[in-house]
Image: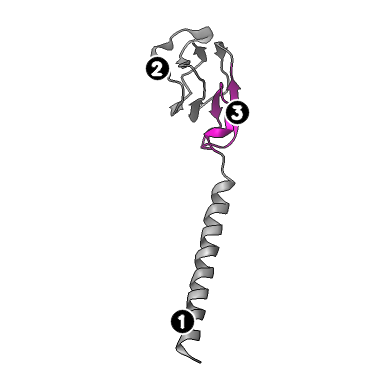
Amino acid sequence: MSRTSVRTKLAAGAATGVMTLATAILGAGSAQASPSDCPVGSVCIYGQGTGWNDIIWSRSAAGTYNLSNMEGDHVIYNNQTNGWKFWTCTGYNGTGCSTGYLPAGTYMVKNLSPINSVKITP
């Protein structure tokens, strides 16, 4: 066997390995959810411990919404536009909203155990 043939085979083997690895990495990433799964103009709350998977609550209209059975840490993504804000409130019907707000285009992980309502405001 000549040197050229060994080098060619080694190069071909290395290229195949790199392509296989790249395909595995790209394939794994494409199956995962992302913030883009939250519709533009909406606020989305994802299931506890699911990261960007499993949207369990989504609203797009301004207003106050009471929550129930939301315990522990959840990813919240404000995909609103035009500077709309998302507020978390300790009381029902939008009271006690001094616990913070989430500006448009941002996300946070928040413990929703003490949160009883949320507001979406322009």
Where residue 105 sits in the image (x, y, percent)? 46, 25
Q: What amino acid is at disc 3? A: Ile
Q: How dense is the environment of label 2, judged by Cα within 10 Å: few (below 14), some, or many (20 and up)?
A: few
Q: Please report contact status of discs 3 and 2: CB closer than 8 Å, yes or no.
A: no
Label 1 residue SS: helix
At a point 53% along the width and 7% down the height, the residue shown is 93
The disc, 1 or 3, on the residue closer to the chain's N-terminal end is 1
Question: In the rendered image of this protein, does residue 72 appear above or below residue 5?
Answer: above
Q: What amino acid is at disc 1? A: Arg
Q: Which residue is mark 3?
A: 56
At a point 46% along the width and 21% down the height, the residue shown is 104
Label 2 residue SS: loop
Q: Quadrant of residue 53?
A: top right
Distance between mark 1 and mark 3 Cα atoms: 55 Å
- Pick whichever, 9 or 80, lies toward us: 9
Distance between mark 2 and mark 1 Cα atoms: 62 Å
Q: Quadrant of residue 96?
A: top left
At a point 54% along the width and 48% down the height, the residue shown is 29
Label 2 or label 1, whichever lies nearer to me, is 1
Where residue 33 sits in the image (x, y, percent)? 57, 39
Is residue 113 part of the magenta span, yes or no?
Answer: no
Where residue 39 sits in the image (x, y, percent)? 59, 27
